[in-house]
Image (cartoon, rainbow, N blue to C red):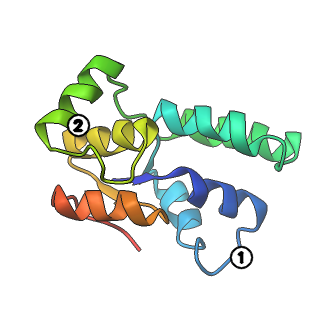
Amino acid sequence: MILVDTMIWVRWLRDPADDAVTPLGPLVEDGAAAWHPIIRGELLLGASGRLSARRFALLDEIFNALPKLVDRSTDEVCSFVAEHALSGSGIGIADAHIALAALESRCSLWTLETALLRVARRLRLPTFA
């Protein structure tokens, strides 16, 4: 299972033929792409204006068919940040939610964000590229 970060979804929804994100299609078809509620929220708030209503509706259909990772409370995420000394690592609270979910579910993480990728490697999370 691979937790797919926000920008991967955005690029894929805009252009599934984009070489950087074409592997997402087969992952979705196989049910191997996972999502997290914070990613859906980021897509709704940040990408919805850049995606057509049809594309955004497609995303909800896809998410309903894929594994959803557990969403921890902000207090739990803050404890995770403290435990792993992630302050100053360059990630925000949304990325911390994503990193914790990937770690707890023991899945790979696919991200284009450099800081999150560094944190994933520091946590010894498998990454997908």
Left or right of 59 on screen, residue 38: left
Q: Is residue 90 above or below residue 69?
A: below
Q: Residues within 10 Å of mark 2 (few under 14, many from 20)?
A: some
Q: Nearer the viewer, mark 2 or mark 1?
A: 2
Q: Nearer the viewer, residue 41 or 79?
A: 79
What residue lies at 73% left-to-right and 45% top-to-bottom? 47
Please name the residue that numbered disc 2 is placed on: 81
Q: Nearer the viewer, residue 119 or 8?
A: 119
Q: Nearer the viewer, residue 10 or 92?
A: 92
Q: Residues within 10 Å of mark 1 (few under 14, many from 20)?
A: few
What residue lies at 67% left-to-right and 62% top-to-bottom? 12
Identify the residue at the far left of this view: 83
Q: Secondary structure at mark 2?
A: helix
Q: Position of residue 118 (x, y in %)?
A: 30, 64
The amino acid on which the numbered mark 1 sits, given as a three-letter code, is: Ala
Q: Is residue 45 above or below residue 59?
A: above
